[in-house]
Image (cartoon, rainbow, N blue to C red):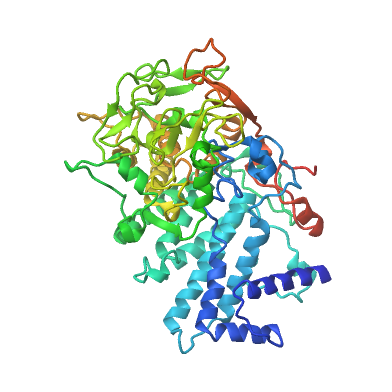
Amino acid sequence: MKLIKYFYLLIICFSVSSCADFLDNAPDDQLTLEIIFNDKERTEGWLANIYSGIPDVIWSYAKYIGYDTMSDDLTPSYRWTPWDWKPIDFTMGNWYTDSEWKSNFWNELPQRIRQAYIFIENVHPTRDLSEAEVENMKNEARFLIAYYYWINTNAYGSVPFFDDVVDVNAPVEELMKGQVPFDEMVDWVDGQLFDLSKKLPASYSEARMYGRATSIMCLAVRARMLLFAASPLVNGNPDYAGFQNYDGKERFNSTYSAEKWVRATKACKELIDAAHAAGHKLYYEYNEDGSIDPFMSYQNMMFRREADGNKEILFVRPDCNFGEYEGHATPRGCNGNGGLGVPQSLVDAFFMENGLPPILGYNADNTPIINATSGYSEKGFSTTEEVRNTKWNETQGDGKVTLANTFNMYCHREPRFYVSVLYNGAWFKSEGRTTRFMSGEWDGGPTHDAPQQGYLVRKKYHPETNRREGYTPYRPGIVYRLGEAYLNYAEALNESSPGSADILKYLNLIRERAGVPTYGSAAGQIPAPSGQAAMREAIYRERRVELNNEGIRYDDIRRLKLGEKLLNGDVMGMNFGGTKYSDDKNDPESFFVRTKSFRKIYSKKCYWFPVHQGEIDKDPTLVQAPFWVTK
């Protein structure tokens, strides 16, 4: 009992001390709270500290949280594991119940939740804070409580739940009461977010409120959560039958419910309607002739703030560590760390310029099944520059997309490919030269700061970054955008009402902005997928490309139960050890040859993060995640 009291007192102390260094020496905790909540600046500081638990969706999603790294989006050099890249170890099977996960969700988010409950209990109107402001701040705190509970539930499947501040003097049975089943947590969070969507404003006019909770954020988190809850991992998954919490309740409902897809569909549509009503729309940039510029639109929707005209953002984290991200995504020969790569499977996923997929699957030996109708080729090199109607100037300007002598694999691909992937032989504007990823070249191996698959990530890499001059432009950390909302709705609708016209409507809005032919029977369109299964696959393909490296792919793989298929096996790329700008498969020195880089290991236990064994040892009411065993 003393240990439990000590633990919660530590949380109180953390809550107070981390709000600011401004706290006066007070005789007790109550007086300290009075000092804080009688002062506007200190009150806002407390609330700001609660907000700090929102994950960094740029750098932390790559390194500490690892949602991009643990998916098939991002492949940091595995030689970085000694430098605290825990998620890289996880992908290779070095993941146990006593493994350290740097996100610290299990420990830190409950601290933020407790701080939020204390805030709600103690904040009050003052000379500088009106009753209306106080009420809105309380609702912001409620949003953060619900959001943090969902983040932890999403990670662990089942977590302890408290609906108020825990009394540190309470009996042990009130402090140690095990975990709440997945569906119960979803229902509670859903109710909170829906209620708050009626109370929080849709937006704020003051710049200082940028990133603060809105009704749109509530609906966005809710829609994403209900899509997850309707998906195969937790909707009728027989693998989890019999897994119970401490109180004997089933952790997951193993009976399929079609109603969950209906519920998700409704939530997604409510979000879209509310977002449109609040002025949100896809971000577009245009060419001189008035046509959509898909290169600039897709690139800058990640960089422009709402104040710059980007109305696509629904949920933003204003401050993110994008400098570290870009440092690791900059070629090593350009004063970068150069090892934040992407796998061949992502390169293969992007459509051709004509809107068709180039790769239909893989043979047992990892060779690609090429779509013969797509025009794709991975033999030979281009003889001329490829020019398109765009203001994108990352390849010497004047509409150039690829240069002469570009490997044909990278030619005539859709705009999102060029904005997302930096390949060998691509023009790198800040250096005024092409990238050279061959071994022993400017940007290549054999060092750890070179891309092991022969590609660096370009998505979320600001084009004006200049590592030699130490210049990294600001950009928002986008947690949720309207493009995802459209794809979420299309997916949910295809499951609840297959054949609905809205499915193609919202899927085509994404493709139109991306600069690829839309689905349909009109001139310039390509045939629409026929039937629910084909449409499902088309939606999955679109999500794979449109949302790449935005922290979403890992959850998509998990909720669709695709981990053993997509995250368990050889990771392919170009030949990291190749020294020649060649595609001769008979020459081991050729760079442009599909080559195994390393092997990922994923089993059914990996769908949920393990509760650290130290937590299990401290609290006998905690039950480990399914299929995890003590190391």
- Give left or right: position of 404 versus 292: right
For the N terminus, give its image quadrant: bottom right
Closer to the camera in the image, 21 or 618: 21
**Residue at the spot 37% in from the left edge and 65% down from the top edge:** 202
**Residue at the spot 69% in from the left edge and 82% down from the top edge:** 29
Where residue 85 sits, quadrant-wise, is top right
User: Compared to 576, does 511 lie above or below?
Assistant: below
Q: In the current view of this chain or complex, which residue is farthest to the bottom?
A: 127
Closer to the camera in the image, 540 or 452: 452
Whether residue 505 appears in this view of the structure is: no
Whether residue 4 appears in this view of the structure is: yes
User: Compared to 594, does 528 lie above or below?
Assistant: below
- Give left or right: position of 236 versus 251: left
Q: Where residue 184 appears, x then y in whole percent?
A: 60, 57
Closer to the camera in the image, 212 or 158: 212
Q: Where residue 138 appears, x then y in whole percent?
A: 50, 75
Q: Where residue 225 appears, x then y in whole percent?
A: 51, 52
For the C terminus, give its image quadrant: top right
- Give left or right: position of 476 versus 158: left
